[in-house]
Structures are given as structure tokens and as C-alpha cells.
Amino acid sequence: MVFLREEVPVMSGPKPNYPICLTEEEVKQFQKQVRAHKTGQDLVVRAKLLLVANEHPEWSNPQIAEAVGTTDRTVRKWRGR
């Protein structure tokens, strides 16, 4: 499940320090959160960026931020947690 707004351009920059590796159960849980109508938007953004980071481990934080529609700072924050 990809939440790309459009084709994300290739951006230069360092590779992430914190790779995201989700289990199948975690992926299902985050997909359920994204689809739920009563999930808070902060949790939806978090779930989307974790799903995109898991699906595209080679992407930099700015690429993930653009795909999800958030900031690079938000991606760095959630990767560090």
C-alpha cells in the first residue's frame, strides 16, 4: 500500500540512520489505522510514513516526507522513536 501523491523525485542526501523493518502484523495494524475514520490525523501521518519507509528502505527522509505530505523533520522524529 503506497500513499504517493505523485512520482517522488530522486533526492540526494544521506541514507537514513534508522531503517524501518515492520512485521506483517505491524503492517496490517498501520494499514487499519490509516483506513479508520476515527483515527487521529497525527496517528494517520505516523502510520503512513512508517508504511512508506518500510516499503522503500532506500528512500531518504525528504523523499518519504514528500510522498506522505509532511515535513522532513517529522520523518526524522518518528524514525528516531
Image: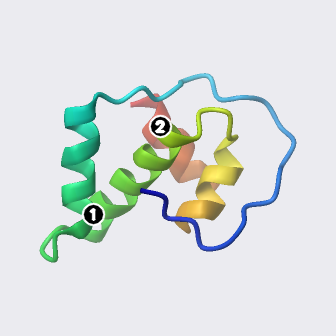
Can I make out residue 70 in this image? no
Q: Compare residues 68 and 27 and report the one nearer the observer.
A: 27
Mark 2 and mark 1 in contact? Answer it, CB < 8 Å.
Answer: no
Q: Is residue 75 left or right of residue 44?
A: right
- Are there few (<14), some (14-19), or many (20+) residues within 10 Å of tag 1? many
- Are there few (<14), some (14-19), or many (20+) residues within 10 Å of tag 2? some
Quadrant where the C terminus is found in the figure:
top left
The picture places residue 44, in percent across and down from the top left corner, at 31, 62
Callout 1: helix, strand or loop?
helix
Residue drawn at the location 22% of the way across and 46% of the way down: 28
**Mark 2 or 1, nearer chain start:** 1
Quadrant for residue 48, please give it: bottom left
The picture places residue 61, in percent across and down from the top left corner, at 65, 44
> Label 1 amino acid?
Val
Q: Compare residues 65 and 27 and report the one nearer the observer.
A: 27
- Residue 24, above or below 51: above
Q: Residue furthest bottom?
A: 37
How has the structure been colored for display?
rainbow
Residue drawn at the location 58% of the way across and 40% of the way down: 56
What residue is pinned by disc 1? 34
What residue is pinned by disc 2? 54
Residue drawn at the location 16% of the way across and 69% of the way down: 36
> Label 2 amino acid?
Asn
Can I make out residue 27 in this image? yes
Callout 2: helix, strand or loop?
helix
The picture places residue 35, in percent across and down from the top left corner, at 23, 68
Q: CA distance from mark 2 to mark 1?
A: 15 Å
